Amino acid sequence: MAKRMREIEWKLISELLADSRKSDRELAKGLGVSQPTVSRLRHKLEREDYIRQYTIMPNFQKLGYTIAAITFVKYKGGLETEHAEEMRRRAERKFKEESFAANVIMFERGLGLGYTGIIVSLHEDYTSLAEFLRILRQYTVVDPDPQTFLIDLKDDIHYRPLTFATLAHHLLARKRQDAP
């Protein structure tokens, strides 16, 4: 069972999700606590694996990607723990061998729509996407008929682009609903 976090810890995680560049001093001012308190809480949350890393949310198009792909795959052999661990090891080896792995930002098992895995990847163009799918179809742990949903990163219309600031607001709203 997950440990119950204090409200200040939820607020700190929310602030860092919205902007991980904030200094402990800035965070302390926004949270209404001292800077040493923020530093201590941040280290505690890192040590307890609530905070795994600090990162940025780049503009993928400016980095040369024009397509984001969400690819649904079916693992051969099912999702049993022993089989899944073997597949994870194979995927690690395959990703080290192939250049296509550099653009895979998520590869996870799961269930839905008749599929047992999902891959989220970025591509410079349709040629690089086609090459990625060609290599994926040769990957021996997945059935050779993946289904892919494409997002045109050059599109001017964005309903809700990927950002963790939205999640930050959701976490605080959820915490308020859960409050006794």
Image: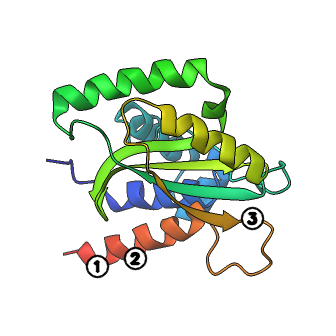
Q: What is the secondary structure assignment of the residue under circle 3?
A: loop
* Distance of label 2 from label 3 (alpha carbons): 30 Å
Residue 142, given in percent of the width and then of the height, sits at 38, 38
Q: State which quadrant residue 17 falls in.
A: bottom right
Residue 20 x/y as whole percent = 63, 50
Label 3 to label 1: alpha-carbon separation = 35 Å
145 in relation to 81, above or below? below
Q: Amino acid at mark 1?
A: Gln
Residue indicated by mark 2: 173
Q: Is residue 104 visible?
A: no
Amino acid type assigned to the residue bearing label 2 in the image? Ala
The residue that disc 1 covers is 177
Tell me, for residue 153, which label it has, or none: 3
Q: Report whether 37 appears left or right of 69.
A: left
Vertical position of residue 40 compared to residue 38: above or below = above
- Return the x and y of residue 36 as percentages of the image width and height: 53, 41
Q: Are marks 2 and 3 in contact (CB under 8 Å)?
A: no
Q: How many residues crowd around disc 1 within 10 Å: few (fewer than 14), some, or many (20 or more)?
A: few
